[in-house]
Amino acid sequence: MATNRSTEIEAREKAELATEDTRTGHVFRPDVDILEHPDAYVILADMPGVSEETVDIHLEKGILTMDARDGTDSPDSTKRYSEYRSGGYHREFRISEDIDTTTVSAQMRDGVLELRLPKSVASQPRRIEVSAA
Amino acid sequence: MYTLQRHTRRPTWSFRGLDRLQRQTNQVLRASDATPDSRRGVYPPVNLHESEEGFSLTAEIPGVTSEALEVSIEGTTVTLAGSRKPQHVATDETAVHRRERLNGTFRRAFQLPAEIDLDKARATHRNGVLTLDLPKSPALRPRQIPVETP
């Protein structure tokens, strides 16, 4: 199982997106985890190399868009060996449930974007007490 | 052209044998290839840059905290080791819709193409990227020799 502590991480190449806008450089599709708690969605996205000020998050008409620009400067030296490319990240999701957009929070830590999307009160599961007649 | 050599990759899952063989083949084929490529299977992915003063080795390790990271240098061998733990624990009430990010441990060793100045080596960790600044040993750095007129 991937969550097992003793597992060695299997590397995968970052998936590059075909960009349709005018920005230059590579744009990758970040690996994500999406967890749904009873009261909120939590999305974790691997975006190594970008800093928080370049991250743009939009939630409109049930579509969540995450976008980040490349924050790394190309060093003033000769590339000797390369296994990864730097670039921005982009990914979109459809969120079917109502999100309380006023309390959405996002933070970047060690190259991972963590988004917390609380469900609106109306869409949270509720226990209905059955009372005896 | 310089190449990195890797070793100390321990095979863990025997049913991954085929995958590993493929990987090793790729490594052999691409060992002298300095262009971005579709290398798979070794974590973390690294880039190596060289200037007159030294080398810069960068590795993409999103989600790995500085505390879970170990960098050591012995002679010309650089070793990166560490682990990535799940940031969110799923409870019984949690539904997992996507689980693409991998957790686990890693260890990779590299042979640098030249001696470095160990005392001046520095490691920084920012935005999920580890950067090792490895100045070359003073004896290897280019030097301007002033020409004296007698």
Image: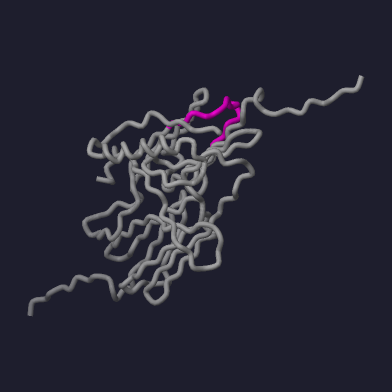
Which range of residues does the magenta coloring cover?
B109-123
Rendered-image quadrant of the C terminus of chain B = top right
Residue at the extreme top of the image, as rendered: B150
In the image, residue A101 above or below residue B94: below
Q: How is the image coloured?
A: one colour
Rendered-image quadrant of the N terminus of chain B = top right
Q: Position of residue B49 (x, y in %)?
A: 57, 39
Residue A23 appears in which quarter of the rendering? Answer: bottom right
Residue A131 appears in which quarter of the rendering? Answer: bottom left
In the image, residue A87 above or below residue B49: below
Residue occupying the point 32% across, 65% down: A40
Residue occupying the point 28% across, 46% down: A3
Residue at the extreme front of the image, as rendered: B29
Residue occupying the point 22% across, 71% down: A126
Residue B112 covered by magenta stretch: yes
Residue B32 falls left or right of residue B90: right
Residue at the extreme left of the image, as rendered: A133
Residue B27 falls left or right of residue A49: left
Q: Position of residue A15 (x, y in %)?
A: 41, 55
Residue A54 covered by magenta stretch: no
